[in-house]
Image: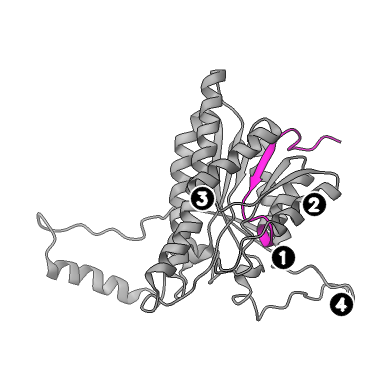
């Protein structure tokens, strides 16, 4: 039976574990050739020796299930290694059609305690890593489009976080990187649309090595109608991967520049920020007293801790 991604080639970064692994397996199940990238460091903070084992294990699982996959040990935050990753997809399968950026690390600290290295390392892996692979994939698609004189098939799915949407006090580096990824994605979506390429970003909520502390108090199994059987973990990565498969497919050709929150059987499409209130000066320009008279009462009437409209609408919490 034909699958929606038959004949297409995908790269999934950070695919040795967690979300990336589930996404790579889902893309392969839908028919794609998959290049499984992972730097393979054991620490979620990016510490430890790099290892090909996680990427090789995911690729082996895909092949054992009848799919096609190769592994790539590489640091996507390194510009040259990111280029080599895209080239591996082209050399192995003829071209690249889908890029799923998922690689990341955590180095949590309150803003007043965070070191320069803790800031730089998280920005480097998340934000620069997304840029690096996107740059080389975009170059590949633009070159193909110019050669054929028309649009090509290209899909980018980037990974942000609810830490960007609703805030995360102990993760200023992570929240900033994830916000930057949203900006990168919307800019890329506009730039590549004329070549036939779409770029979207997801905010997944899933139980992985990266989020084990956040979701430590939430049980992995919840009783369903039959208490003896139970139901799958609502935070399992497998709740996220079908959306990635859809966004990578031909069916999602009309979905571009969108931010989607996904977890536990729920997908929400987030709106761009909207104006909540508008004030005009009664004079030629605002002065301090006029701003005080207008803004202080307005913010005093809003609930404490109220943030962006998107977070309010979705009822989001830290994730």
Q: Nearer the viewer, mark 4 or mark 1?
A: 1
Look at the numbered disc 2 and give the secondary structure of its residue.
helix
Magenta part mainly helix, strand or loop? loop
Question: Could you say which disc has been placed on residue 288 in the image?
Answer: none
Q: Residue 234: which quarter of the image?
A: bottom right
Instruction: Looking at the image, tell me whether mark 4 or mark 3 is earlier in sequence order.
Output: 3
Ranked by sequence position, the earlier of labels 2 and 3 is 2
Q: CA distance from mark 3 to mark 1?
A: 24 Å
Label whose residue precedes the other's in the sequence (4 or 1):
4
User: Which residue shows up at 60% across the image and 77% down it?
Assistant: 213
Question: Which residue carries the number 3 mark?
Answer: 130
Q: From where the camera sits, is residue 238 visible? A: yes
The disc at residue 236 is 1
How far from the left and from the top, in percent, is residue 122?
A: 47, 63
Residue 227 is marked as: 4
Give, as a single range, the part of the protein colored magenta. Answer: 1-19
């Amino acid at each position: 039976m034909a699958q929606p991604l038959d004949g297409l080639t995908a790269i999934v970064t950070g695919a040795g574990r967690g979300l990336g692994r589930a996404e790579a397996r889902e893309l392969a199940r839908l028919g794609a050739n998959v290049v499984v990238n992972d730097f393979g460091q054991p620490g979620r903070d990016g510490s430890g020796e790099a290892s090909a084992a996680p990427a090789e294990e995911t690729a082996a699982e895909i092949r054992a299930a009848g799919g096609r996959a190769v592994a790539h040990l590489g640091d996507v935050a390194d510009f040259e290694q990111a280029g080599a990753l895209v080239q591996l997809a082209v050399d192995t399968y003829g071209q690249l059609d889908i890029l799923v950026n998922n690689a990341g690390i955590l180095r949590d600290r309150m803003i007043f305690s965070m070191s320069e290295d803790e800031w730089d390392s998280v920005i480097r892996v998340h934000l620069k890593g997304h840029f690096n692979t996107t740059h080389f994939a975009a170059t590949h698609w633009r070159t193909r489009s110019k050669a054929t004189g028309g649009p090509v098939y290209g899909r980018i799915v980037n990974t942000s976080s609810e830490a960007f949407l609703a805030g995360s006090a102990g993760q200023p580096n992570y929240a900033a990187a994830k916000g930057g990824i949203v900006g990168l994605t919307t800019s890329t979506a506009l730039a590549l649309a004329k070549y036939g390429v779409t770029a979207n970003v997801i905010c997944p909520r899933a139980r992985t090595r990266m989020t084990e502390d956040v979701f430590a108090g939430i049980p992995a199994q919840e009783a369903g109608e039959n208490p003896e059987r139970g139901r799958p973990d609502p935070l399992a990565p497998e709740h996220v991967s079908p959306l990635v498969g859809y966004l990578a497919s031909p069916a999602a050709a009309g979905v571009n520049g969108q931010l989607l929150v996904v977890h536990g059987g729920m997908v929400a499409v987030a709106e761009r920020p909207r104006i909540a209130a508008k004030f005009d000066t009664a004079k030629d320009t605002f002065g301090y007293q006029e701003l005080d008279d207008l803004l202080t009462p307005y913010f005093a009437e809003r609930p404490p801790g109220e943030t962006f409209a998107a977070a309010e609408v979705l009822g989001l919490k830290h994730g």
